[in-house]
Amino acid sequence: MDPVLSLTPAAAVEHIVSLVRALPGRRVTVGIAGGPGVGKSTMATEVVAALGSEAAYVPMDGFHMRHAKLEALGTVADKGAPHTFEGQAFAEFLERLKTATEDVAGPGYSRAIEDVVENQFVVPAAARVLVAEGNYLLLATAPWWRLRPLLDLAVFITLDRETVRARLLRRHAEHGLFSEERNRAHVERVDLSNYDLVSRSAGRADIVIALDSEH
């Protein structure tokens, strides 16, 4: 792994795009990993926008377990932790995309309803670059270990933990679904625990980018 790069968000996008353009192959996969609240989804969508029609966005969030399943399992309070995702299904989906020659639709996640939404994005047959994004792309535990070999370029994004805490509190409050007390408890018990867990997987990335941002 190369040394950690300290970059602004705009410079990080530019750097990732330059690396992606140098990757050979009919269909290559870039993984943008990092803890919750570090800005992965924004980074991924901006990379896709910069690459244009040759790229497609593939978020891991659509592979949350459905809320009804979490209720049945009694794990609603853990939502967002690794065991509340369909990790194997996401690995199988990414494997399928690597060789697909047709348009493929994938699920997304709506924070407005806190649940999965089917067919929220489409990976066009013509896309040469898949930009996958998610917290757990670089974990070495089952079933997540299946993802790293599928990534032609693995990027880990990190951001100051206190900045992440503030961002997550704002995110949970955005749709007014829960009380402030619940949001604070969830951020401390689940989100920041996930941030710490994911941070330990940074060593499996090809590059680590520490975002220099006050936002």
Image (cartoon, rainbow, N blue to C red):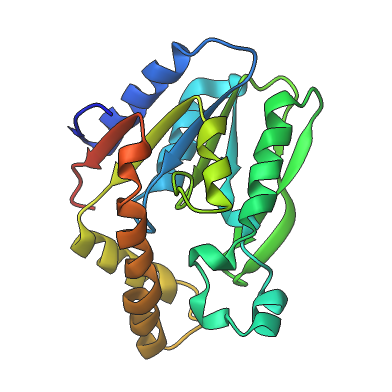
Numbered-mark total: 0
Residue at the image position 55 percent from the left and 53 percent from the top:
142
> In which quadrant of the rendered view does residue 10 lie?
top left
Front residue of this view, candidates 154 and 130: 154
Residue at the image position 60 percent from the left and 40 percent from the top:
58
Position of 159 with respect to 52 (left or right) is left
> In which quadrant of the rendered view does residue 211 lie?
top left
- Image spot of residue 117 (x, y percent): 71, 60
Position of 112 with respect to 169 (left or right) is right
- Image spot of residue 70 (x, y percent): 64, 77
Front residue of this view, candidates 141 and 37: 141
Front residue of this view, candidates 107 and 10: 107
Residue at the image position 50 percent from the left and 74 percent from the top:
175
Residue 7 against residue 144 in the figure, above or below: above
Q: Quadrant of the N terminus?
A: top left
Outermost residue to the right: 102
- Image spot of residue 20 (x, y percent): 45, 19
> In which quadrant of the rendered view does residue 33 lie?
top left
Residue 100 against residue 202 in the figure, above or below: above
